[in-house]
Amino acid sequence: MTDVLEVRNLHTRIDSASGVVHPLDGIDLTLKAGETFAIVGESGSGKSMTALSIMRLLPEPGWIERGEVNLDGHNILTLPEYRMRDVRGARIGMIFQEPATSLNPVLTCGEQIVEVLERHKIEEGPAARRRATEWLKRVGIPDPERRMDEYPFQLSGGMKQRVMIAVALAAEPQVLIADEPTTALDVTIQAQILDLLKSLQKERGMAMLLITHDLAVVAQMAHRVALMYAGEIVKIGPRDAFFAQPLHPYALKLFASLPGAGKRGEPLASIKGFVPPLHGQFTGCRFADRCDYAYDRCRKQAPAWHGPDPQHQARCHLLDPREEWRLAELLRREDDKVPEAADFAAPADAGDLLEVRDLKVHFPIRKGLLKKVVGQVKAVDGVSLSIRQGRTLALVGESGCGKTTAGKALLQLVPVTGGTVRFGGNEVLGLKGAELKRMRSRMQLVFQDPFGSLNPRMRVGEIIAEGMASFGIGANAQARNDRVAELLGQVGLAVESRYKYPHEFSGGQRQRIAIARALAANPQLIVCDEPTSALDVSVQAQILNLLKDLQKTLGVSFLFITHNIGVVEYLAHDVAVMYLGRIVESGTAEEVLNRPRHPYTQALLAAVPRLNTESKLPPLTSEVKEHLAADIPSPANPPAGCHFHTRCPLAVEACKAAYPAEVAVSATHKVRCIMVQPE
Amino acid sequence: MNFSPVLLITDVLLWLLVFAVVGYVWYVRRHEHLLVPWLKVRQNPVAMICATVLVAYAAIGLADSLHFRTASGAPGRSQTGVEVRSVLDVLLGAALGPMAGKSEKTYSAPLAIYSFAKETVEKPGGGQAREFPRLTVGGAHLKNPGDRDGDIAWRGALGLAKGLVLFAVLNGALALWVGRKGGGPALAARAMWRGTTPAPWRPILVTLLLICLMACPAVALGSHYHLFGTDKVGQDVLTISLKSIRTGLVIGTLTTMVMLPFAVLLGLAAGYFRGWVDDVIVYLYTSLSSIPSVLLIAAAVLIVQVSIDNHQDLFPTTLQRADMRLLALCVILGATGWTGLCRLLRGEALKLRELDYIQAAQAFGVARLRILTRHMLPNVMHLVTINAVMDFSGMVLAEAVLSYVGVGVDPTTNSFGGMINAARFEMSRDPLVWWLLAAAFFFMLGLVLAANLFADAVQEAFDPRRVVRRARPRIFQRGPVGGMTEAAEDPRAPGGRPA
């Protein structure tokens, strides 16, 4: 294989209010034809900057200080801008993260592909249109003739990403840069897009630079992997070796902080401290301040590359052959550590805390001058579930299935259409005024986006105390003040934080503040709406550990709304799977995750990319994938009968007749599918 | 001679506003998140130049907003002997002497000593002749008319010298103030001129210098000539222009103050409550903005004018009546001008109400009013600030347009619009009477341009999407390309090239 793209000693700088930032400090990598090279790293590590530097599409205050980007042996950094435009698209293609915004909404899909073909003088006129249609077909879009003239808003997210791939590949570039190509997509769609990228790459023999934060996607896709930290590559190696031997302490921690079934009961590894600010020069190892194994040399000298073989190396002094004795010593000490006892026995059954029956949230669709109701979006359509004292129920489903709406409906933050919600034995739906307030003090909410959930104009102390004042908790301001200090301690923040504003905190710290705010009301149930999906894995690990500790010490129950199966496996006692506003399968975590019966649950679990083959489930067959590729139906107009029959590999005629009744597989395990027989 | 203060309503409101601004500054200094964008404004040299100019205008306007009554002569004389004057009048009287106020018969050109129109005069030796008579006060000190150019040059140069002295005094005072926290005035003055202070003092000082160099010669010349000529009834145009500043400021600020409650309250309520509240408010502002605004304002002004005329007894002096009409104009402009900002705030509130922290507050059972005031309002204040500053100049211009149409302020109130309107009739004359329009244009341009540029700077500072950009046109790179000089002990790239 030949080197297509070679990046040598790339240094990128960005002007900012606080001085010049060095997001890339000496990046070296090579891409061979037909190879997938993955760059993984947490946010701020510089992985997207690498892609933008290669494409020379840096944001305005940024520039490349020095380095080379050789494409077929020619340095494209010295090209004038007008010649660079011939490189972009024609020789290096790029796919972005968000399919919704990377296509121009006022151009048809066909026009966007034709534009690329005509710009790079590959085809023109009707021939270009033919070629574009061909491309749509190649990226797996059904009925490409019709889709050519459709606008992006008429396509689903997965379809849009397929069109984006067609646009990026239309001019047949030698290199494809995929920057988080599946992060915004659901797992079932992600699996399809990853397969598509893989097959296109094989077919065309192009090199692919895959940039992602998701180690599992890397494990599935990449031939070689580079791990970035604070603007440099700290570890590089072929995929299997990369995951088999962490080599670098950072990689070791990162792997250990991934939640999963195997780690149930143990606390997840977390990395202390923060990514250092990237201003100016580092004298030692960039990871030294956060490393458990750092010693004096780490702070004085930047580590060189060491490793078992030339292909698999890491920047760490411990790998230096001269330091072997130290490594051996460390390993011996690690072995001596007694692993913390697994403590995941579910608490004694104290009865149901929350009992939801047939909860419905319908949003009316209004049209015309008089706003006549012409239809209903059935966001939540008859959900029943129960949460027990001190336990965690995970509500799992793809985006748009209504799981967030269901969570908000429990607190009556959205108008509820019907059903009953009994909390501690009392009906809470329809409560008003003071009683509603009392109910809300016992149920609280933690939101997904830690940047949107805190008022930027209020101090942290005020944010936490506001709920207490509203509920009349604490006798006076002094008592509430003391409680704020106590809560901040409980979530692991310094007491002084109360005088600061939210923008002074990182994402993980903000999520801690949000948790402290929820705890301020002494709730018995906290609805956590994707509380970690906006966070990096190492930070996610800290938050998951915190939630688990809180459950242990305070006995609070969680309704955990998420699409991250790894988190569910790690944290949940019970699981309910939701599809188009209804629960299709529910049961204990063990039952649902290990012996899923509903075809949707099976597909969902099998589509999750995994680091290792710990899953007992068979991978998805191509036939199943084809079925799943169908668009998710709209909740305004759900299919008759079983909602899933349009995408179900097992669907028969009877599925279209009526919505299946609940089948109890065991006392706790319930499935809604006519193909499932009670045992 | 007795003396008693007169409180005009607009005076009171204007001074309340000044105190509100001082209070806001005091509040901002204690809240870091509010202070940060204003510090950015402070670092912008253009903004500080504009602020200096605006402060100069505000000083003139505020001096003209302290009114008092002097009754000359014996008590018990009729009302006509009572004269209401402002501090600015007194200052102008002191600086310009007999030039301030009505002194000539009719038009005279800037710095002229002869009238603009021929008159029939009695010859000393009997008989009549038509000639350009000498002005009553403009250049009256000159015995020999031929000395005019030399006298003007001499007084101008003297004025410039006085300007330099005044500036030196001001500079020294500022240096004392900046250097009060250590360093001393000498060091502070050096730092100010070298640009090493946090605020860009050098452009401020240059602006101050220019203002001094304009003001002092203006006073030196204006005390013996009509610097900007006189108008149709022989009033000094410089005096009219300076007195017009107050009208512009009142309209610009009070209108905004009238407008803001409408826009903020209705906009937030519409966006937050949705439903029928939203429908009502949206219908209200769409109907309002579909009526031609000039017609609406004209109708309202005429109605108010009639009712003022019918209640003469409420206003003891013409000044108070004119003031009431000015206030009415502000209220009318404000009541019809809130739709734009309201629409903007409604959109922002619609976005904010869906944000998680608003929902979190709802989940905490926080009262609606508190959510509106504590959570929504602070998060739209940046929009309100930007809009208020930008609207200011728009309102000054609106006054000019309305006075031109004839529905603006009272004819006895000096205003830029009135000046332009008066100049309109003379634009077709030959030789042209250009100085009225030129003076209005010069003073209004200074005010509006400064306000606009300042608004731009405020908007830039409050816009979170702006990134710091340095004036370094570095498209790509300089220096050695691909130099391999990194500090690592072993620069070879791992796995880079297979052996």
Image (spheres, helix red, strand yellow):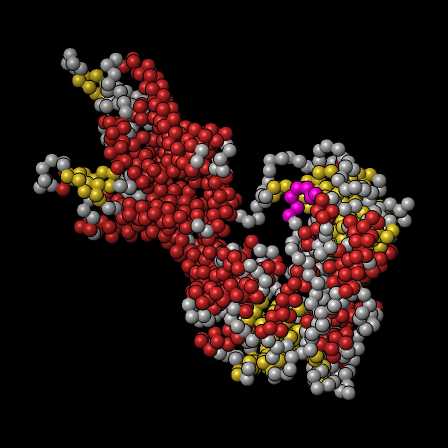
Above or below, A657 relative to B460: below
Query: In the displayed structure, does residue A589 sit left or right of residue B49?
Result: right
Above or below, A151 relative to A26: below
- B452 or B119: nearer the viewer: B452
Query: In the displayed structure, does residue B492 sit left or right of residue B176?
Result: right
Quarter of the view holding residue B449: top left
Above or below, A174 relative to B245: below
Q: Position of residue A669 (x, y in %)?
A: 71, 82
**Residue A281 sits inside the magenta stretch:** yes
Q: Residue at x 79, y 59 (%)?
A: A331
Q: Position of residue B140 (x, y in %)?
A: 24, 20
Q: Position of residue A139 (x, y in %)?
A: 79, 59
Q: Residue at x 77, y 37 (%)?
A: B485
Magenta region's main secondary structure?
Answer: loop
Q: What range is drawn magenta here? A: A277-284
- A2 or A360: nearer the viewer: A2
Q: Which quadrant is the C terminus of chain A positioned in?
A: bottom right
Quarter of the view holding residue B418: top left
Q: Residue at x 71, y 33 (%)?
A: B478
Quarter of the view holding residue A508: bottom right
Query: In the displayed structure, does residue B489 sit left or right of residue A422?
Result: right
Q: Residue at x 19, y 40 (%)?
A: B69
Q: State whether residue A179 appears in this view.
A: no
Q: State whether residue A204 appears in this view.
A: yes
- B362 or B222: nearer the viewer: B362
Q: Position of residue A172 (x, y in %)?
A: 82, 49
- B95 or A568: nearer the viewer: A568
**Residue B497 sits inside the magenta stretch:** no
